[in-house]
Image (cartoon, rainbow, N blue to C red):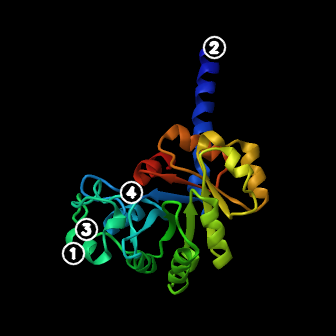
Amino acid sequence: MSVLVRRLLALALVLTASLVAAPAVADPDFTVTAHRGAPSRTLGENTLPAFGRALSDGATAIETDLRRTKDDKLVVLHDSGVGRTTNCAGPIGAWTLRDLMRKCREDTSHQPVLTAAELLGWAEQTGASLMIELKGSNWSIPQVREVVNLLKGSAVFDQVAISSLRLTVLQRVHRLAPNLDTQLIVSGWRKVRASIGQVEGYNVPASALTTSRVKRLRRKGIVVVGGYADSPAQWRRLARLGVDGVVVPSVRAYSEWAR
């Protein structure tokens, strides 16, 4: 192989890589969702400072989580317990909202645990879109109705998508609010195949997707998001597949890659 041919091949690889990254930058409808905001050594996950940092880093949406306290109040928390992220201990279900607000602070930035109402107020102020996961499987119809009514009473209903690992939870959401976007979080294609037509979108790992699968879903008007993609290799693959967006742990790293 001549030196010229080798140089041309190298140039082709560079051009191909830039073209693969292009949709994430050029398409205004492509969503870059920050997983629990932009947590760092000084900014705790699922806090308003971390959410704000994610937006300034280039996020177009924030992924976050809702759980219920002992007195059935809605708070923003990923884990079933408060020990990993706050100075308190025990399951969230053992804490009333009043005690949680009075005693517990996030370990890194010393923020109080967010309530769902505070989260929606922040989204109204900033215009941020939210992907809210209802954590756990035991969301009764009255509890789902509380979430739906909270969204309907806010100014950000159209900025929110509800996600869950449980199809039954999303079916309850859809029955109560047919116009509210829902996304099923899956680990593989089998769960997608079994639920097509029952949700508005899927949060799917890159390893479970192919070009034909993405095209099939998009032809049906179903949103396809690459779930928790944390490396340039995954980002390249998802861009090549033509997904509608990605969920990333570091928006800054993704934005630098996609430039």
Q: What residue sits right under mark 2 in the picture?
A: 2
Residue 243 at x, y percent in the picture: 65, 52
Residues at badges 2 and 4 in contact (C-beta under 8 Å)?
no
Residue placed most toward the observer, 201 or 100 = 100
Q: How crowded is mark 4: few (under 14 residues within 10 Å), some or many (20 or more)?
A: some
Residues at badges 2 and 1 in contact (C-beta under 8 Å)?
no
User: Residue furthest toward the top?
Assistant: 1
Q: What residue sits right under mark 3 in the picture?
A: 111
Foreground disc of the pair 2, 1 = 1
Q: What residue sits right under mark 1 in the picture?
A: 102
Distance in Å between CA atoms under marks 4 and 1: 19 Å
Residues at badges 4 and 3 in contact (C-beta under 8 Å)?
no
Residue placed most toward the observer, 54 or 259 = 54
Foreground disc of the pair 2, 4 = 4
Foreground disc of the pair 4, 3 = 4
Q: Which of marks 2 and 1 is nearer the N terminus?
A: 2
Quarter of the picture containing the N terminus is: top right
Q: Mark 4 falls on what kind of element? A: loop
Q: What residue sits right under mark 4 in the picture?
A: 79
Residue 43 at x, y percent in the picture: 28, 59
Q: Residue at x 21, y 65 (%)?
A: 110
Q: Which residue is drawn at 46% across and 49% down?
A: 254
